[in-house]
Image (cartoon, rainbow, N blue to C red):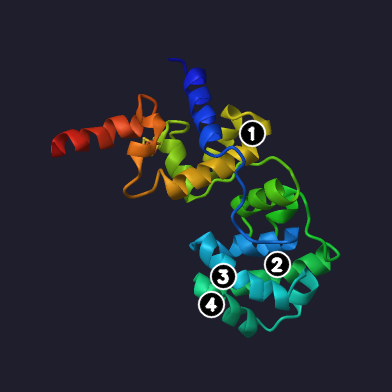
């Protein structure tokens, strides 16, 4: 089987299991998505969604957030972890949006990654979901699953992003990012992945063939 044929099988399978994948974070504006994505570092989307309704009710815009007392932001986002660092970044990013971008969240990767707390992953989440601009989001799930499936052999997130950009059609970048994150979160998990539910265990997934299948045979 050629690499192109394997890739097609993987993309078709992801389309089958996630035909209309969406970002699971709650937000109403691009600025709120930026904040929610900063909060999602080392935290589940479910937990972020528990704190953002209160946070956004009190500080809905960059202008409001820029005037917030940092101790109040800390109190509101405490349960997402790393709350001191996240609060500082949210406050500084809000101030920068107000001072350098007239209060409007910029819509280019170059400008978004200037904001404190926003790396390429966060920028690509915002671009893909709030601005309809294609981007590949490389988080822990994308890293793990793309390696398991042999879509890349690299481990550096930025290198993986560029590697996948060469292989995945640009029109699919945002959808593919959602699909891989959901697939990694709910099926191809870091520990105890649900390979018995996954069609790719049938000759496509090298990780299954080289690790899990062999383990299963040993246990018999
Ligand atoms: S077979 Fe298992 S390891 Fe491979 S992609 Fe499917 S869930 Fe992930």
Whether residues under marks 2 and 4 lie with C-beta atoms below 8 angstroms apart, the answer is no
Q: Quadrant of the N terminus?
A: top left
Name the secondary structure under disc 3. Answer: helix
Q: Tell which circle, 2 or 1, labels the residue nearer the N-terminal end.
A: 2
Which residue was labeled with disc 4?
Answer: 78
Which residue was labeled with disc 3?
Answer: 50
Which residue was labeled with disc 1?
Answer: 172
Residue at the limit of the structure toward the top, as seen here: 1
In this picture, is 16 found above or below 116?
Answer: above
Residue drawn at the location 34% of the way across and 38% of the way down: 195
Residue 24, image x and y in percent? Answer: 59, 55
| Front disc: 2 or 1 | 1
Q: Residues within 10 Å of mark 4 (few under 14, many from 20)?
A: some
Q: Tell which circle, 2 or 3, labels the residue nearer the N-terminal end.
A: 3
Which residue was labeled with disc 2?
Answer: 93
Label 2 to label 3: alpha-carbon separation? 22 Å
In this picture, is 178 found above or below 29?
Answer: above
Q: Tell which circle, 4 or 3, labels the residue nearer the N-terminal end.
A: 3
- Classify the position of ligand 1 by quadrant: top left, top right, bottom left or bottom right: top left
Task: Name the side, left or right, on which 168 lies relative to 199.
Answer: right
Residue 94, image x and y in percent? Answer: 73, 69
Residue 200 seen in the current view: yes
- Compare residues 166 and 141 and report the one nearer the observer: 141
Name the secondary structure under disc 4. Answer: helix
Name the secondary structure under disc 1. Answer: helix
């Amino acid at each position: 089987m050629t690499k192109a044929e394997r890739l097609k099988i993987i993309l078709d399978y992801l389309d089958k299991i996630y035909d209309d994948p969406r970002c699971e974070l709650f937000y109403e504006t691009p600025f709120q998505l930026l904040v929610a994505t900063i909060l999602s570092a080392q935290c589940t989307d479910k937990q972020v969604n528990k704190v953002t309704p209160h946070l956004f009710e009190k500080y809905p815009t960059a202008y409001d957030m820029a005037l917030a007392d940092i101790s109040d932001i800390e109190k509101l986002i405490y349960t997402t972890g790393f709350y001191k660092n996240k609060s500082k970044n949210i406050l500084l990013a809000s101030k920068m949006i107000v001072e350098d971008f007239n209060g409007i969240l910029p819509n280019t990767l170059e400008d978004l990654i200037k904001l404190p707390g926003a790396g390429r992953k966060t920028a690509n989440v915002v671009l893909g979901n709030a601005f309809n601009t294609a981007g590949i989001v490389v988080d822990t799930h994308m890293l793990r699953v793309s390696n398991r499936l042999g879509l890349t052999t690299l481990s550096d997130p930025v290198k993986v992003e560029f590697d996948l950009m060469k292989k995945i059609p640009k029109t699919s970048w945002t959808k593919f990012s959602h699909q891989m994150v959901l697939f990694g979160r709910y099926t191809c998990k870091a520990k105890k992945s649900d390979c018995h539910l996954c069609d790719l265990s049938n000759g496509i997934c090298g990780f299954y063939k080289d690790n899990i299948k062999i383990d299963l045979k040993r246990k018999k």
